Image (spheres, grey):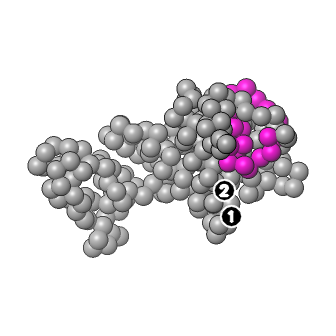
Amino acid sequence: MKCPGQDTRYWRFDDIFTVACRECGEQVEFFKDDSVRRCKNCDTLNPNPRLDLGCAEHCKYAAECLKEIAQSTGDKQGLLKNVLDKEMRICLGGNREALKKADILIDAVERLLAKEAADPAPVYCVAYLYPVAADTCDKAGELPGEFAEKYRGLLLQWGYSAEIIDDVLQCINCLLIGGSCGSQAYCILHDALLLCGLQSGAAVGGFLTEASRLLAEAEVPHS
């Protein structure tokens, strides 16, 4: 698959490169806009290790492109996580403390998703966008209207349903103001914040998922 938004007239000499096949080690040639290439030696599909999806925020072909890449790689969640991660890091910029906390939070979310049955799509959206919202909200913890407007449009563009987007924005707002909602995404993010010490358990009422309670018990040193 080729990105329809790419113009090869502006490519550099290193935009065509080779990488070792993940199965047999044979060299596989990539153009920078390839999502995957098949190894001529063993027929294994290899993902492009240099694929940069940061363009998805502003490209009019984003929905089409992300859908086709997801189909060709078979890893829709991994693809969308890549896009969300880039967006988070761009927005937080040089705020190292915020980035550090975000990475700790996402690690906790990953551990919970490994044990808790939940739709990962809204969970990852909240996990990556909550740190951005926390960094931009006002002193009262209110979510800026432009944040909701921006990410409603972007998430639609990236292929998320209106239902998931509503859930994501509600979860983020509840986490910011100390409210609550009953969705799985909210419960997992609420507990992830507790697990990594970014919120007070007394303030938010303890864990909401069994997976969180089990992880917390496992991490408590036993005498």
Of residues 95 and 101, the one drawn nearer to the viewer in this rendering: 101
* Residue 195 visible: yes
The label shown at residue 51 is none
Query: According to the image, label 2 marks what residue?
Result: 101
Query: According to the image, label 1 marks what residue?
Result: 97
Which residue shows up at 48% across the image and 50% down it?
82
- Measured as percent of width and height from the top left, residue 84 is found at 55, 49
Which residue shows up at 76% across the image and 41% down it?
175
Whether pointer 1 and pointer 2 mark residues with C-beta atoms closer than 8 Å, the reply is yes
- Farthest bottom residue in view: 13
Q: Is residue 86 magenta?
A: no
- Measured as percent of width and height from the top left, residue 156 is found at 57, 39
Bounds of the magenta segment: 178-201
| Residue 218: quadrant of the picture | top right
- Measured as percent of width and height from the top left, residue 27 is found at 17, 59
Indicate the secondary structure of the residue bearing disc 1: helix
Indicate the secondary structure of the residue bearing disc 2: helix
Q: Which amino acid type corresponds to the residue marked 1 in the rendered image?
A: Glu
Q: Which amino acid type corresponds to the residue marked 2 in the rendered image?
A: Lys
